[in-house]
Image (cartoon, rainbow, N blue to C red):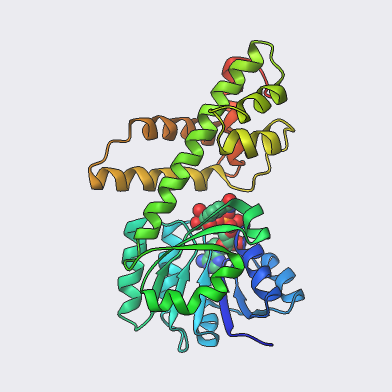
Amino acid sequence: MTKELLGFIGVGRMGAPMARRLIAAGYSLTVYDTNEAAVAPLVALGATQARSIAQVASAAETVFASLPTPEIVQAVAAAVATGNRVRTFIDLSTTGPRVAAEVGEALAASGITAIDCPVSGGVMGAEKGTLAVVVAGPRDVYDRLKPALDVIGKSFYVGERPGQAQVVKLVNNLLSVTALAITSEGMAMGVKAGIDATIMLDAINAGSGRNSATQDKFPRNVVPRTFDMGFALALSYKDIRLCLEEAERLGVPTIVGNAVKQVLGIAKATQGPDADLTTIVKAVESWAGVEVK
Ligand code: NAD
């Protein structure tokens, strides 16, 4: 059975696997990305390639976006508003609460409902359809969209106002990067003390220090030295910056958060903005003079 026609803008590391799952679930997709090479594999699966954002928004009533920066999301949303069919814009990107609210207001002026819909769970979660999908926007629109959201993960409705889902997402990412940064320090310490990295992780994962870095990122991406989690340092830095800006606006202290932002900044400066987030460990390793492997 053919389901609703959907638009999808931005089919990079996260967007592509989400788009693939929607196609596999029977949705027709009209896709646009400035990088044509990213679109071709989806066309091979049956998607239609659009030549502009306006073309996507004139083909589909519901348009998804998965884009790298808040500035790009704002520009894309403005272009979406020029389409003549779109009614709902679902932003899967991490943009921060302020931009999500601004995008919501700007689109409302054109009669388009914005759904603030950041996702968590990485490229692997996007491939398996196990993402945490945090949603803020009108409840009735969420209820209507839920079958499509169920294809990409498990959704959590958090409120009516675009921007509220971004707060949950940013806090999630702050916790996740904090775990990665502190695990880098702890693991470098263990290895320098002569302990096998894998045995140390096994012990911690059976104990109270376990976290997403000890359970997933270190065994999968750091110890095998593959550094292929699929999330760029620059995007993570953007998330933490947005999180701390919002905390400041709300008047909440972020002492630990600011330390983590500094560690991330050092990693970005030394490894490069496109390096994988898991290379954060290298900043600690070069100082400590050991490798966690
Ligand atoms: P990415 O850079 O791999 O993909 C972004 C895509 O957007 C690219 O294909 C790029 O060509 C395209 N693009 C850029 N400008 C465009 C424009 N003006 N019009 C159309 N397409 C454009 O990034 P990603 O890792 O897939 O992340 C996308 C979003 O998801 C970000 O907001 C990120 O913070 C968030 N996110 C990423 C992960 C992850 O693990 N990678 C996890 C959760 C959330």
Looking at this view, is 156 or 51 the one in front?
156
Quadrant in which the C terminus appears: top right
Residue closer to the observer: 65 or 138: 138
Q: At 61% from the left edge and 26% from the top edge, which residue is drawn?
A: 204
Query: In the displayed structure, does residue 123 sit left or right of residue 103?
Result: right
Q: Is residue 158 visible?
A: yes
Give above or below for 168 relative to 162: above
User: Which residue is at a point 51% across and 34% down the rendered structure image?
Assistant: 179
Residue at left offset 28%, top offset 36%: 253
Q: Position of residue 199 (x, y in %)?
A: 71, 23
Return the x and y of residue 255 as percentages of the image width and height.
Answer: 33, 30
Q: Quadrant of residue 225?
A: top right
Q: Position of residue 283 (x, y in %)?
A: 56, 26
Q: Is residue 231 above or below residue 73?
A: above
Q: Residue furthest top?
A: 193
Along the viewing direction, whichever of 222 and 264 lies nearer the viewer = 222
- On-image quarter of the N terminus: bottom right
Can you give x and y, in whole percent of width and height, for residue 183 in the image?
55, 28
Taking 118 as reference, is 151 left or right? right
Q: Nearer the viewer, residue 162 or 149?
A: 149
Ligand 1 in which quarter? bottom right
Q: Residue at x 32, y 68 (%)?
A: 160
The answer to whether residue 68 is visible is no
Where 142 falls versus 252 (above or below)? below
